[in-house]
Image (tube, rainbow, N blue to C red):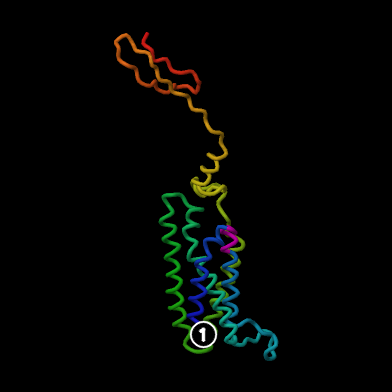
Amino acid sequence: LIDIFLFSNVVSCFLYTDVAATFGLRRVIVAAASLMTFGCLLRSGMPNPFVGAEALARSMPSYPTEVVGTILVGAAQPFFQCSPPLLSATWFGPSERALATATAINFNQVGIATAFLVGGFMATSPSGMHAYFDVLSVSCVAVAAATMLLFLERPDEPPSASPAPGGSSSSACLRTLRSSPAPSAAPSSCSSARPAGGAASGCAPRCPSSSSTACNTSPP
């Protein structure tokens, strides 16, 4: 299962940039949270009303179900691991982005450490393993619901020019330059007349105004 998880994780990493650029940050994060939740539910064993007398009786999932759940979890995880730079650029100013990105990336390691600690404490038996997966599933459902309700695409007022709704500052500038008419440059003139001193005059400087009238450099 760990090999399947890593393979789907790596494949999803290569798809993140194109998917995020196409659908936007909110849609990608909400979809990844839903995918992660569904995968955790499959791995923990979903309620089965046809087993036993109780409607909420549970059974351990089959191996194919575990494989599908592992693929979904592995495919969803890179969308949280790779999104901190885009999240920081959208929600934070230039002086805050380094700290925001580092915090988001390092909390991924905090989650891994928490999984080792909680899993090592709970998963000491088959029933404990099942209870551990239940904790993961309930946590994923709560976080996915909060993401759908609270996570926004971007702030109402961008903290800087780069996360403006039109795109990054460089792309916005390029679009502005392409749509603007070309300015008319004032022609420079060279005087071939020799002043009284006999020295040849050089090219006249460009006129300060945008008028096409040549600058008069002849001596009075």
Q: Name the residue rendered at 52%, 47% in the picture.
A: 171
Q: Give the image location of residue 80, x and y in percent.
A: 51, 65
Give residue 38's quadrant in the image: bottom right
Q: Name the residue rendered at 43%, 20% in the picture.
A: 189
Name the one closer to the observer, 142 or 36: 36
Q: Give the image location of residue 10, x and y in percent.
A: 48, 71
Residue hosting label 1: 129
Outermost residue on the bottom side: it is 52
Name the one closer to the observer, 41 or 62: 62
Name the one closer to the observer, 168 or 143: 168
Q: Name which residue type carries label 1.
A: Met
Magenta segment, which residues? 22-29
Magenta stretch: includes residue 25: yes
Q: Give the image location of residue 161, x and y in percent.
A: 50, 45
Give residue 32's quadrant in the image: bottom right
Q: Give the image location of residue 62, x and y in percent.
A: 59, 87
Give residue 202's quadrant in the image: top left
Residue 149 higher or lower than 117, as above or below: above
Name the one closer to the observer, 144 or 67: 67
Residue 173 higher or lower than 149, as above or below: above
Judged left or right of residue 216, residue 38 is right
Q: Which quarter of the rendering shows the C terminus?
A: top left
Q: Secondary structure at mark 1?
A: helix
